[in-house]
Image: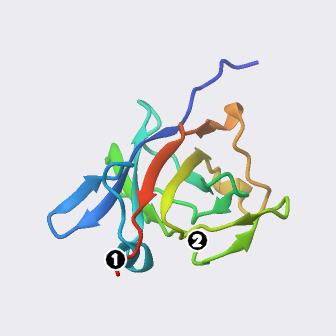
Amino acid sequence: MPADPGPVATVTGLYRGTFSGLEPLTKETPLTMDEVRRNPVFYELEFQPGQEDADLIIDVIYDNLSPIRLQDLMRGTDLPRGIRFWPDWFEIPPYREMRDTDGRRVYPRSPGIHTVRIRTARRNRSERGLPRDFGPANGGSTSPVFEFAIAPEEQ
């Protein structure tokens, strides 16, 4: 059996988009409700050495909800060749209230602290249409839990 190749890419941080570029997104720098409604949250991918030409599958796990599938990133079309770091983005689920897979009520856009984990793995072009595999043999990785805050609306 071949040695574990390690993760194809890891997520190194969350960012908000501003007029001056990307700024780190943390609990101490909350998103405003207007930013939540209008702007995506950026995350930075760091590719492991020797894996820079890989195509990726990516899921976002927001507030411990079921994973949300993001668009597959294909080298040469979605990811330029020769780029070691790549910012991609996701939107905060567009619901004021929803139920998770266990039936509990959640509030994805409510003020307070929220969590995000992002999992990545290699996408083999021959596997299109097959179930997505985030296992170690496919270079799968799940990021640490990132926390960020949403500020209450000002009256």
Residue 128 position in % (x across, y down): 71, 61
Q: Nearer the viewer, residue 80 or 145?
A: 145
Pointer 2: residues within 10 angstroms few (<14), some, or many (20+)?
Answer: some
At 73% across and 53% down in the image, what residue appears?
Answer: 132
Looking at the image, which is closer to me, 120 or 4?
Answer: 120
Q: Give the residue drawn at x 68%, y 31%.
A: 136
Looking at the image, residue 118 lies above or below residue 102:
above
Q: Could you tell me if residue 74 is visible in this image?
A: no
Horizontally, is 53 left or right of 2 in the view? left
- The image shows residue 56 at horizontal and vertical percentages of 55, 51
| Residue 58 seen in this snapshot | yes
Q: Is residue 112 left or right of residue 108?
A: left
SS of the residue under disc 1: loop
The residue that mark 1 highlights is 154
Task: Specify the quadrant that holds the N terminus.
Answer: top right
Task: Give the vertical position of 105 relative to 114 (above or below).
Answer: below
Amino acid under disc 1: Glu
Q: Which residue is mark 2?
A: 93
Q: Where's the C terminus, which quadrant?
A: bottom left
148 relative to 38, above or below: above
Q: Nearer the viewer, residue 132 or 117?
A: 117
Q: Amino acid at mark 2?
A: Pro
Residue 92 coordinates in the image, percent (x, y): 52, 68
Secondary element at tag 2: loop
Q: Which residue is drawn at the image coordinates 65% and 22% (left, top)?
A: 4
| Residue 100 placement, left or right of 140 | right
Query: First in sequence: mark 1 or mark 2?
Result: 2
The structure's colour scheme is: rainbow
Q: Quadrant of residue 53?
A: top left
Query: Where residue 103 sits: x, y (%)?
Result: 84, 64
View extreme (front): residue = 155
Q: Residues within 10 Å of mark 1 (few under 14, many from 20)?
A: few
